[in-house]
Image (cartoon, rainbow, N blue to C red):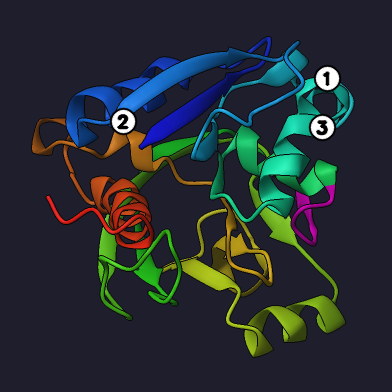
Amino acid sequence: MKFAVVVFPGSNCDIDMYHAIKDELGEEAAYVDYRETSLKDYDAVLLPGGFSYGDYLRSGAIAARLPIAAGIKEAAEAGKPVLGVCNGFQVLLELGLLPGAMRRNRQLTFICKPATLIVENNQTVFTSTYENGQSISIPVAHGEGNYFCDEETLAELKENNQIAFTYKEDVNGSIDNIAGITNERGNVLGMMPHPERAVDDLLGSSDGLHMFQSLLKQWRESHAITS
């Protein structure tokens, strides 16, 4: 399986994402520059965290208007897994691939600490190796991670099982403690916590590795690879 790690000006978690795939998952990964326009050669697309363009304007707003945006949308429309973490989540919102918007943390301060998440839906390509209701430890590091949507959108997210993760406790003021959502089709996931920083017990948790293992499991099953 071949993963694309999209690199925007200001990305600072691209190396962590590459390490998670290449060294911990043992699969192929490649950095893709933001000036590229196609991601056809890849089986999954990863948008890492960071501060694209310094988060000027709105976080992710400028990154969503770069040439690579066309390739990201094309991959999502083709049904390929597209994962956006932190700044990557904000980019997916700005691209319109996920509903809602991101606001500054309720505390108006940057938050950097381990967080306990609850797996709300393990029936996605990103979460199939977790258990529903499982508590997992994934670190957060953001200043603008307060997810918001209107009541109608929230009802749709619940009705369609699009809420993948919630925070066990209120971390940043996100509506209904939402930490990660998918699109209705289930192949696009945006989440503020960083699974790529939790792929080895030496890092304090390996709970994030299960997400990448879920993607690999689904890909192998769809390509009839058993070993």
Q: Mark 1 touching mark 2, by CB under 8 A?
A: no
Q: In the rendering, at what x and y percent does residue 19 appear?
A: 29, 21
> In this orientation, which residue lies closer to the viewer: 89 or 118?
89
> In this orientation, which residue lies closer to the viewer: 88 or 108?
88
Disc 3 target residue = 70
Q: CA distance from mark 3 to mark 1?
A: 6 Å
Residue found at x 45% / y 17%:
30
Which secondary structure lies at badge 3? helix
Q: CA distance from mark 1 to mark 2?
A: 24 Å
Q: Is residue 69 left or right of residue 180?
A: right
Up the image or down, 148 lies above or below 121; here it is above
Residue 195 placement: quadrant: top left
Q: Mark 3 touching mark 1, by CB under 8 A?
A: yes
Q: Which mark is residue 21?
A: 2
* Range of magenta residues: 96-105
> In this orientation, which residue lies closer to the viewer: 186 or 199?
186
Tell me if residue 102 is in the magenta stretch: yes
Pick whichever of labels 1 and 2 is earlier in the sequence: 2
Residue most extreme to the bottom: 159
Pick whichever of labels 3 and 2 is earlier in the sequence: 2
Q: In the rendering, at what x and y percent does residue 126 appear?
A: 42, 58
Amino acid residing under circle 1: Pro
Residue found at x 80% / y 60%:
100
User: Marks 3 and 2: which is nearer the front?
Assistant: 3
Disc 1 target residue = 67
Q: In the rendering, at what x and y percent does residue 32 appear?
A: 58, 16
Up the image or down, 170 lies above or below 172; here it is below
Up the image or down, 128 lies above or below 74; here it is below
Q: In the rendering, at what x and y percent does residue 12 appear?
A: 51, 16
Point out the image quarter for the N terminus. Answer: top left
